[in-house]
Amino acid sequence: MSAILDEDVVDSASIAAASTKRRSLWALAIRNSSVIVGGAILLIMLAIALLAPVLGTVDPTRIDPAARNKKPGTEITFRLDDGLTAKRTVLMGTDSLGRDVYSRVIYGTRVSLMIGVAVAVAAVSIGLVIGLVSGYIRWLDGIIMRIMDGLMAIPGILLAIALVSIWRAGLITVIFAIVVPDVPRVVRLVRSVVLTVREEPYVEGAISVGTPTWTLMFRHILPNTVAPLIVQGTFIAAAAILAEAILSFLGIGIPPEIPSWGNIMAEGRTLFRVFPHNILYPGIFLALTVLAVNIMGDGLRDTLDPKMSKKV
Amino acid sequence: MLDFIARRLVAIIPVLAVVAVFVFLMLRLTPGDPAAVIAGDNATSDQIADIRAKLGLNEPIWTQFAIWIGNVLQGNFGESFFFKKTVAELIAQRIEPTLALTTCTLIIALSLALPLGVLAAWKHGSLIDRFVMAFSVMGFSVPSFVIGYCLIYVFAIELGWLPVQGYIRIGVDFWGFLERMVLPSFTLGIIFIALIARITRASVLEVLNEDYIRTARAKGLSNRVVLMRHALRNAAVPILTVIGIGIALLIGGAVVTESVFGLPGLGRLTVEAVLSRDFPTIQTVILLFSVVYVLINLLIDISYTLFDPRIRY
């Protein structure tokens, strides 16, 4: 009976302490100027992605042989479905198949943001589970960490390229290929937090009153990993958006019919000397988005994870 | 010291073993018959049977791994069915541009990033400090191929100072070689400059508060001596560590940069191999790059003692 009482005391006290600390950190984070600037740019990008159909775009996959390779600002005449013709100015020009680059870039925002979020969520969740297991179940630690070291010995982009080559390129393959190289980094982070936290008096207290392992892991240890994981997740998202663009640019990323920034640039490579707009516009969007995520990550790191910000 | 090197060498064995298992499994994880995958689309059934026997595909998987690793250790990486020559020959042919590109990049990046980082730390909070920080955030965000195309557009197409693309072997025409290395090296170098300048600034900044820096200044040493000999040298260990980790970025970046500038190096070879599903080549390149990456980091670990005599093994 007393054991149960004790556990309750330890529990509520530690959780209360942790949550007030966390709440004040979040309040700090949303007031950080880097977080505000990065977040604002990202919100604009999100709005562009969601509102793509009403931003004056046409079907980004529509091929128009009569309007191939037009420079930005050209007025083109196109045929409607009922046989009439209409005029339209192509803001960012057209590509060598006559597809509207502006519409492709705007729709490409959806692909990039989706890849960034998907990879960050997947890498953090997989890494979190493996990291908790590795940090807590000691006999598995050696094996897991050797495998993680081995994966980290293969340069990230190269590992992604290798994974893409195993299966035929598709959206899911590409996401998976970008996730795998990021997992060991998350595992190491989570494991190091677990190893520090399990020596803390409140965890020892919880162990001594017989808290089940799973409760211990998820209620007492997991909350400590949230702040560093959000920071890490942000940087993973930025790197993932870049990685997708690199893979697609090399021609081994997501299928070419999906308008992603990397694919638009891959398409523009051959005629770059004459029509640089195919590379320029998606490049600007890509750089701006990654920059925004990185700036936000820097701000989050400074406020949420002061220990890490001292290191770099 | 020798003891330490021996222990570190032993420690990289499990790491390389995991890499080897992964590289070995790559081919076995592909859907379909690995022999047919290797042989390519135009192979006859005799050729497939031949490959099947050579790879020992009829044996249990452990025997297959033993055969494969035995071959690799003897330098026999198999034959590229796409390029019609052995993978070892192929790599020997393609290694020069990659070595040249990475070396030039390292030279440019170090000679720009170290002074920039030290300067930013010294003039902490000044305009130059903010410039270095802004540059390093930008460097991480703008993909290297976008930088590459911008450089090509400005310096090769608009100004016409440098050639757009291509490669000339160093032994054939040295000036032609250098001309063609400038733009690719800067392209690949930007992210590396960003990385090293940032860590240099951070670690020099930390060292500048130490007592021995004040002592050095009190002795009347010039700023240059204080910064370069006392501050930078003591900040060397974290900088070296980051350079080691950055080698992965350099290798990944080389794949992209070689594609942008049409350099016939290992990076380009990797992409060509993936596009033609030439597995012996992909496997060897991954293995090679990983071994190089691990060995460079081992060398860096060992070199710490040179910069910081307090570290003893």
Image (spheres, coloured by chain):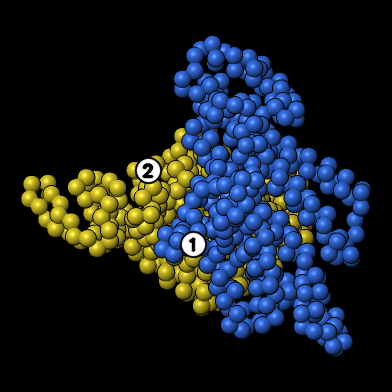
Residue A291 visible in the displayed image: yes
**Residue under pointer 2:** A256
User: Where is residue B192, by image quadrant?
Assistant: bottom right
Looking at the rendered image, the quarter that the N terminus of chain A falls into is bottom right
Tag 1, which secondary structure?
loop
Give me the chain that's blue.
B
Nearer to the camera, B254 or A252: B254
Q: Is residue B177 left or right of residue A74?
A: right
Instruction: Please say if A62 is above or below B74.
Output: below
| Residue at 56% across, 20% down | B35
Chain letter of disc 1?
B
Amino acid on which disc 1 is placed: Trp
Amino acid on which disc 2 is placed: Pro
Residue B161 image label? 1
Cα–Cα span, label 2 and label 1: 34 Å
Q: Where is residue A215? Give x, y as percent.
A: 64, 53
Q: Residues within 10 Å of mark 1 (few under 14, many from 20)?
A: few
The answer to whether dots 2 and 1 both sit on one chain is no
| Residue at 87% across, 48% down | B5
Nearer to the camera, A53 or B73: B73
Q: Where is residue A58? Give x, y as percent.
A: 23, 54
Nearer the viewer's eye, disc 2 or disc 1? 1
Give me the chain that's yellow.
A
| Residue at 68% across, 72% down | B115
Q: Where is residue B95? Give x, y as percent.
A: 64, 42
Q: Is residue A113 left or right of residue A32?
A: left
Instruction: Please say if B308 is above or below B181.
Output: below
